[in-house]
Image: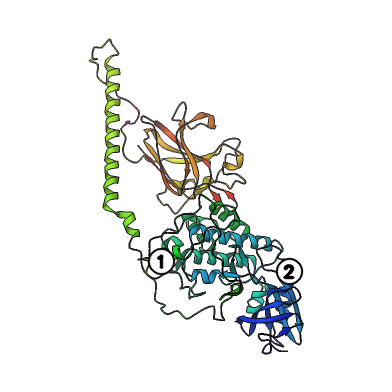
Amino acid sequence: MSNQTVSPGALLAGRYRIAELLAEIDGARVWRAVDEVLSRAVVVDVLPVGDPRTNLLFDAARRAAAANDPRFLRVLDCDMHDGVTYCVREWAGGRTLERMLGSGPLTGQQAGWLAREVSEALENLHRTGYAHGAISPATVVITDAGAIKVIGVATEAALRSSGAGSPEEDVHSLGQLLYASLTGRWPGPAPAWGLQPAPVEHGRLLSPRQVRAGVPRSLDDICDRLLGDPPRHHAPPITSAAGLSAALSGVVGSSHEPPNQMDETVQVARQNGSVDDATQVVPQASPPAIDPTPQPAYGEEPNGYRPPQPAYNQAADTRPVRRQPPPPSNGNGRRRHEEPKAKGGWGGRILILLAILALLSVIAMAQFLLKGAMNNDQGSGDGGSKSSAPPQTSTTPSATTGGKAVIAGAKDFDPPPGDNVEHPKDVPNTYDGDPSTVWKTQSYKKRPNLGGLKPGVGIYYNLGAKTSVSSVAVALVGDDTSLQVLVPTGDTTKPPSSIDGWKAVAAKEDQPEGTVTVTLPAGTQSQYVLVWLTKLPKVSDGYQGIISEVTIQK
């Protein structure tokens, strides 16, 4: 028997009845077959007689046996019969991610959940010292029940003669898979897996949010930490499956229940531009399976395989990609005309303007009443007669608000039970006017409240003299940061050495990434202002606060 004589109807090794050809990889053929002993469907990889990949496939099958995570399709048998090398694997009806992306990108929740499922499976595999070696949209299958299955552990790489691979390569490939799921573009120089290449600018891959509107910022950051060289904002790269699983769990949760997948009706609506499916990161309720409408178990794409075709095609157009306008997000080549209206309609602008005017009126009225009350207090000090004495001249700075306060210096603040050191060399980055430079706390384990080890950590800023402070703007990196603004309780011209010497005057809880402005009570004056972090955002190896810029207004 030879590879050419293995054909539909043939009985391989007296047990496996060949049914249909699923794919062909460099001369190797992948068949759907029926195990007549156990009466079940299987997948059989067949190498021709004398193929040099024979030993590679045997070795890969042995390594695949170590993959005991249920998300991997198992190798059931590997042997040689009449000179033909064959490898038998589990069967699972469903659709490959490659086919799903042919209809357009996934939602943020779907993409993040899918990547987390694959990452957790790889995490378990990497603990054994082995790697998958060929993670791609073609080796990830969404079953009829909505579960994730990864096919071809080690064996796919052996058939493609691409080497055994490494855990780091698996994680990078999974980063490409996440990027493609979010954008519908492939993060590479050429088309692949039926997707056009993602745009680049100045030799750097554009982030998913730059390619497709509505991609959640948290998933955008994770993609950049996987694929960025180096990652933006000095963020630490993600190089392990364990780190990626933790980062994705912080965004999409840890549930193994699949998120909702669009049925045909919703998909048509999305193509018409009436459904924006990428804005929600975490659903408020557990939705049904990722594919509620079952597909035929042996349909047009059994076990996730498509008819044989090359993985890469020639690019139809290799000209540089302009950053504007971004690629269409509706998956059919037409730009949505409804989306810009939601951002800039005249009605919305008028409402915003009216709200601002109302706020200013309230502030002006409050200042007027406060000033009147202060004048009454001064006039009643001698029984109601007006004082003829000239006003006293203060030696402290004017309490008039307005303008940016000059920061004369700053210091990290990590009082006991801390060790009094929290990356002091990076503190100047928070007031150098450059948002690309940052200060980071240490990384804390288990809980976002600094691991439960201490109440907080931060930086205090020296304004050079006692100054009126109206607000503090803090540019944060990472979601779900809680912070307070404190001033000394006694002499505000000296920084207290313990947290008991400071008092909180304002706070913000669970803030998203970006600039948060903390408004202080009227009349707040101090030479020292402490920005105090009490809850830190999730990072790959724990929880860590990151500040890129601080501005203090008089």
What residue appears at the point 69 percent right and 67 percent down from the top-left corner? Answer: 130
Residue type pointed to by label 2? Ala
Percent x, y of residue 23: 60, 80
Residue 140 vs residue 40: left or right? left
Percent x, y of residue 205: 46, 66
Q: Which mark is residue 65?
A: 2
Q: Secondary structure at mark 1?
A: helix
Question: Closest to the observer: 527 or 191?
Answer: 191
Q: Which mark is residue 271?
A: 1
What colour scheme does the image use?
Answer: rainbow
Residue 478 vs residue 240: left or right? left
Percent x, y of residue 79: 76, 79
Quadrant housing residue 525: top left
Quadrant housing residue 175: bottom right
Q: Is residue 184 magenta?
A: no
Q: Start and end of the magenta stretch?
A: 393-399
Quadrant holding the N terminus: bottom right
Mark 2, other Cα within 10 Å: few <14 / some 14–19 / many ≥20: some
Q: Secondary structure at mark 2?
A: loop
Quadrant holding the C terminus: top left
What residue appears at the point 26 percent right and 16 percent down from the top-left corner? Answer: 379
Residue 274 vs residue 61: left or right? left
What residue appears at the point 65 percent right and 81 percent down from the top-left corner? Answer: 19
Dot placed on the residue nearer the N-terminal end, 1 or 2: 2
Residue type pointed to by label 1? Gln
What residue appears at the point 61 percent right and 39 percent down from the top-left corner? Answer: 453
Q: Which mark is residue 351?
A: none
Question: Closest to the observer: 22 or 428?
Answer: 22
Percent x, y of residue 508: 45, 39
- Above or below residue 387? Residue 356 is below
